[in-house]
Amino acid sequence: MDYVIIAFRSRTHTIRFAEELRRRGILSEIVNTPRQAYVGCGLSVKINKRYFPFAKRLADGLKFDSFAGFFALLDNGRTVKSL
């Protein structure tokens, strides 16, 4: 299964974004940011790729200044690409 990683430069924003997703019924997990992404505070939010459009709209609406980007996590976590 493919996942999307949502990276922030702030741990506080990472945790808050995960909470906002959960409040809206979207399963998410706080994970270590894959080193291939080369961004962020070291923590990211991981979601199933099917929720990407919703997460993108939410990130756009919340306007966190620490937002670092969306990344596709493919091949059991071995490949990361920017979205």
Image (spheres, rainbow, N blue to C red):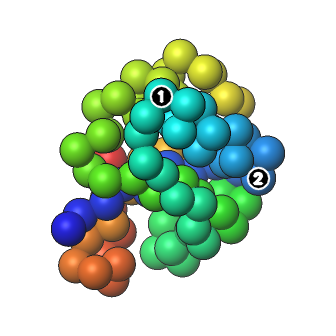
Q: What element carries label 1?
A: loop
Task: Give the amino acid at mark 2.
Answer: Arg
Report the side of 52 relative to 65 (left or right).
left
> Which image quadrant for residue 45?
bottom right
**Which residue position holds label 2?**
11
Kindly identify the amino acid type of the residue bearing the numbered disc 1. Arg
Residue 80's x, y, as percent? 35, 69
Sort mark 1 into few (<14), some (14-19) or many (20+) by Cα contacts within 10 Å: few
Dividing the picture into quadrants, the one containing residue 44 is: bottom right
Quarter of the figure with residue 35: bottom right
Of residues 35 and 73, which is closer to you in this image? 73
Left or right of 17 on screen, residue 61: left
- Look at the image and tell me in which quarter the N terminus lies: bottom left
User: Could you give the CA–CA distance between mark 2 and mark 1, rounded to whole angstroms?
Assistant: 20 Å
Q: What element carries label 2?
A: helix
Q: Can residue 10 be seen in this view?
A: no
Mark 1 lies on residue: 24
Q: Residue at x 63, y 39 (%)?
A: 19
